[in-house]
Image (cartoon, rainbow, N blue to C red):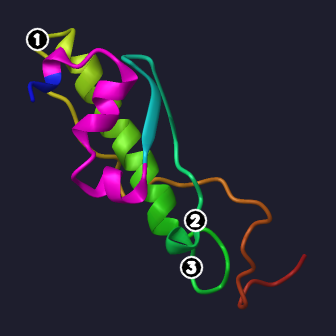
Amino acid sequence: MDIRRLATPEEWTARGAENLPGVIGIVFEKVEPTEVIARVAIRKALMAPNGYLHAGTVVTLADTCCGYGTRCASSSRPRCSPTTTCPPSTRWNCWPPPRIPHQRRR
């Protein structure tokens, strides 16, 4: 499948169907150079043992959206050399902030 010719969200969803995005169940609703919208149906297999959504599920969704978005953007700019992943050092906003045991209160 020539990724440069993918046009519809269904084609982008099919692109990852036999790989990790398909295993997770990522479905794309919009893939454009400036915006990617995707969803995942939450199910028990995607949960951590503590009952929360596993971070790997969240990172897989974010990483796939970043990769597909940059591929989509680069297909419209032939000289572009896209990044296909988001850096693992990405700081995710979480609330409430985690407590650090050794941190002193002020």
Mark 3 touching mark 2, by CB under 8 A? no
Query: Measured from the top left, where is residue 55 in percent x and y?
Result: 52, 67
Crowding near the residue tagged with mark 1, few <14, some 14–19, many ≥20 C-alpha atoms within 10 Å: few
| 3D distance between C-alphas at marks 1 and 2 | 39 Å
Would you place residue 1 above or below residue 100 in this image?
Answer: above
In the rendered image, is residue 4 in sight? yes
- Residue at 44% in and 33% down: 28
Q: Is residue 14 magenta?
A: yes
Question: Which residue type carries mark 1?
Answer: Pro
Residue at the far right: name it: 106
Q: Which mark is residue 78?
A: 1
Q: Which residues are magenta?
A: 4-25
Would you place residue 63 above or below residue 45 in this image?
Answer: above
Q: Which mark is residue 60?
A: none
Query: Measured from the top left, where is residue 37 in percent x and y?
Result: 51, 30
Give the structural element (helix, strand or loop) at label 1: loop
- Residue at 33% in and 51% down: 22
94 or 36: which is nearer to us? 36
Earlier residue among tags 3 and 2: 2
Crowding near the residue tagged with mark 2, few <14, some 14–19, many ≥20 C-alpha atoms within 10 Å: few
Q: Quadrant of the N terminus?
A: top left
Crowding near the residue tagged with mark 3, few <14, some 14–19, many ≥20 C-alpha atoms within 10 Å: few
- Residue at 44% in and 17% down: 34
Question: Which residue type carries mark 3?
Answer: Ala
Q: Which mark is residue 43?
A: 2
Q: Which mark is residue 48?
A: 3
Would you place residue 39 above or below residue 92 in this image?
Answer: above
Q: Is residue 47 left or right of residue 76?
A: right
Query: Measured from the top left, where is residue 103 in percent x and y?
Result: 74, 83
Mark 1 touching mark 2, by CB under 8 A? no
